[in-house]
C-alpha cells in the first residue's frame, strides 16, 4: 500500500460538501473515516483487507483475494448431522453463518480462521470505541470551555 493508496483511502474526508450537507451525509463520512481507521490499524488481517475492498472497490477486484480453505460451518454441520440433536446442529450452523456475515470477509473463511479473525476484529472495534469515547470527551470539554469563555 503506497502513498497513492493512502491518499485515495482518505480522499473522502477532503471532498468539499455544500454548506447544507445533511446530517446523514456527515454521519456517512464519519462512519467511513472510522472504518478506514480500522482498516489502517489492522493491515494484514483478512477482515481488514475485506473491509478495505468493500470501502474502496477497484475494477476487477470483487473480494480481498485471500480465500481460505478448511472446515466451513456447513462442513461441520454435515459431519454432525448423523448424531442426535439435529436442532442443535442447525442452531450452531445458523450462528456461524451470522458470525460470517458480521466479520468483513468472514464468508470466505474456514471455521478456525473465522474465530481468529473474529477475535481480532472485536479487539479492533474495542480500540475504535475507546478512541471515539476519548474524542467525544475532548469535544465535550472544548464545548464546556467555550461556553465558560462566552459567559
Image: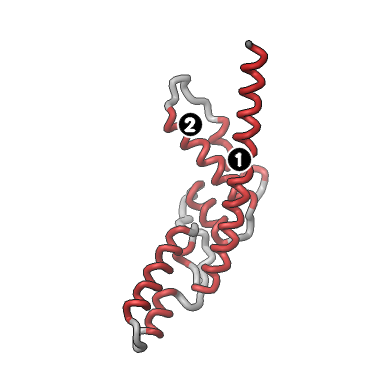
Left or right? Give the position of 90 relative to 30. left
Which residue is denoted by mark 1 in the rendering? 133
Name the N-terminal-most of marks 2 and 1.
Answer: 2
Determine whether, in the image, residue 67 is placed left or right of residue 43: left
**Residue at figure coordinates x 62%, y 17% from the top left:** 147
Measured along the vertical axis of the image, is residue 3 above or below residue 109? Answer: above
Q: Which residue is mark 2?
A: 26
Q: Quadrant of residue 144?
A: top right
Secondary structure under tag 1 reads: helix
* Label at residue 57: none
Figure quadrant of the C terminus:
top right
Residue placed farthest to the top in the image?
151
Residue in the foreground of this view, choosing between 43 and 31: 31
Q: Residue at x 46, y 37 (%)?
A: 28
- Position of residue 84 relative to residue 136, above or below, is below
Residue 11 location (% of width, % of height): 57, 36
Q: Residue at x 43, y 80 (%)?
A: 76
Q: Nearer the viewer, residue 131 or 8?
A: 131
Q: Badge 2 local density, few (<14 within 10 Å), some, or many (20+)?
A: few
Q: Is residue 101 left or right of residue 1?
A: left
The residue mark sitting in front, 2 or 1, is: 1
* Spot occupied by residue 4 in the image (x, y as percentages of width and height): 63, 43
Please rate how many residues cluster around mark 1, counting C-alpha atoms within 10 Å: few if below 14, some from 14 to 19, many from 20.
Answer: few
Q: Between marks 2 and 1, how big is the CA–CA gap?
A: 18 Å
Residue 54, position as x, y percentages in the image: 48, 51
Amino acid at each position: 500500500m503506497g502513498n497513492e493508496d493512502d491518499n485515495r483511502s482518505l480522499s473522502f474526508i477532503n471532498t468539499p460538501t455544500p454548506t447544507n450537507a445533511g446530517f446523514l451525509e456527515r454521519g456517512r463520512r464519519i462512519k467511513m473515516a472510522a472504518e478506514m481507521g480500522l482498516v489502517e490499524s489492522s493491515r494484514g488481517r483478512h477482515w481488514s483487507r475485506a473491509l478495505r475492498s468493500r470501502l474502496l472497490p477497484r475494477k476487477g477486484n470483487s473480494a480481498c483475494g485471500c480465500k481460505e480453505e478448511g472446515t466451513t460451518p456447513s462442513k461441520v454441520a454435515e459431519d454432525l448431522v448423523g448424531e442426535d440433536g439435529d436442532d442443535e446442529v442447525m442452531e450452531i450452523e445458523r450462528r456461524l453463518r451470522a458470525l460470517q456475515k458480521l466479520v468483513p470477509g468472514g464468508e470466505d473463511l474456514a471455521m478456525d480462521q473465522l474465530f481468529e479473525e473474529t477475535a481480532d476484529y472485536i479487539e479492533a472495534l474495542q480500540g475504535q470505541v475507546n478512541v471515539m469515547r476519548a474524542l467525544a470527551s475532548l469535544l465535550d470539554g472544548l464545548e464546556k470551555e467555550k461556553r465558560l469563555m462566552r459567559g
